[in-house]
Image (cartoon, helix red, strand yellow):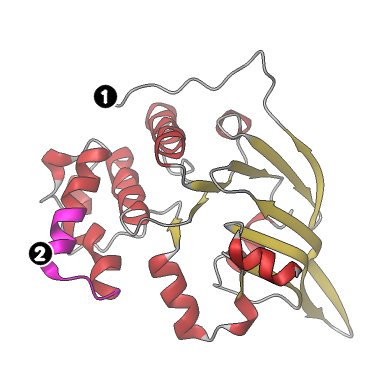
């Protein structure tokens, strides 16, 4: 009955007792040591911790870029261990939007063409992909930059293109790896406001890995990691609400 319940009302993302170990001589070192994490539908969660705490290792497992030594990760009720590499790629193209710190835009393509990529890879027609990409770029405030290549965009604009690319597939959840790490404070704040606003308006769950308390304050829930384990959890104080501003 438990599995049937998960299939009828799946949570976007869940990890249970996840361990990631690497050999170290005759022993092993654990980047992750029994991590449990559950992201509810429409929730905005920040994962914090110092360098080496396991944040990046966890993110790679959650989006299927790496596999755990033990434990399990579920996306929308599907155990990632049951999927081969093609299945994991298809999942990222259709259900999980990923935003990288370094943007990961293809330099020879325009902003619109970069946003079209996951749609075209999933078999969407060129015309439909073009229409959806333009609409999403307009939504993130870049309608006038559709034809510009990444090297013709500011850092903040490039990250907005990356956000548009992650959201254009209409994902169940967006996973963001230090999305403001390469940006100055002004552009970083703009990207965080955008993620918060899109989360509020579209109900897309967001999991953001960050080292910055100011960035984590945009989340509904803050999970703290240390030495490969979850060591704390909190919610921003009620007397310090996150303000969501309209896009400029």
Q: Which residues are magenta?
A: 122-132
The answer to whether residue 172 is seen in the rendering is yes
Residue 197 lies in what quarter of the image?
A: top left
Residue 32 within the magenta-colored segment of the rendering? no
Tell me the quarter of the picture where residue 18 sits: bottom right
Residue 86 position, x and y percent, is 45, 84
Determine whether 171 is above or below 27 in the image.
Answer: above
Q: Is residue 146 above or below residue 16?
A: above
Residue bearing the label numbered 1? 248
**Residue 91, horizontal then vertical, whole percent:** 46, 72
In the displayed structure image, the side of residue 51 where residue 172 appears, left or right: left
Find disc 2 in the rendering and name its residue: 127
Lower position in the chain sequence, tag 2 or tag 1 = 2
Q: Quadrant of the N terminus?
A: bottom right
Q: Quadrant of residue 54?
A: bottom right
Judge left or right: residue 105 versus residue 10: left
The relative height of residue 16 versus residue 22 in the rendered view (above or below) is above
Is residue 126 highlighted in magenta? Answer: yes
User: Which residue shows up at 77% across the image and 58% down it?
Assistant: 36
């Amino acid at each position: 009955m438990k599995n049937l319940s998960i299939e009828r009302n799946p949570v976007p993302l869940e990890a249970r007792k996840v361990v990631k170990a690497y050999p170290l001589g005759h022993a092993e070192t654990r980047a992750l040591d029994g991590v449990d994490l559950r992201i509810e539908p429409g929730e905005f969660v920040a994962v914090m911790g110092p360098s080496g705490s396991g944040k990046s290792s966890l993110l790679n497992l959650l989006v299927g870029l790496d596999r755990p030594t033990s434990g399990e990760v579920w996306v929308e009720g599907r155990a990632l261990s049951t999927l081969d590499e093609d299945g994991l790629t298809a999942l990222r193209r259709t259900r999980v939007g990923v935003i990288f710190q370094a943007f990961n835009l293809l330099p020879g393509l325009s902003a619109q063409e970069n946003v079209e990529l996951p749609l075209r890879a999933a078999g969407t027609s060129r015309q439909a992909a073009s229409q959806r990409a333009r609409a999403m770029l307009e939504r993130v405030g870049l309608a006038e930059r559709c034809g510009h290549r990444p090297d013709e965009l500011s850092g903040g604009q490039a990250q907005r293109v990356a956000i548009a690319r992650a959201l254009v597939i209409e994902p169940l959840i967006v996973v963001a790896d230090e999305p403001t790490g390469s940006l100055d404070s002004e552009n970083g704040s703009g990207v965080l406001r955008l993620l918060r606003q899109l989360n509020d308006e579209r109900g897309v769950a967001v999991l953001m890995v960050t080292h910055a308390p100011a960035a984590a304050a945009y989340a509904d829930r803050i999970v703290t990691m240390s030495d490969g384990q979850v060591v704390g959890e909190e919610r921003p104080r009620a007397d310090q609400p996150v303000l969501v501003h309209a896009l400029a």
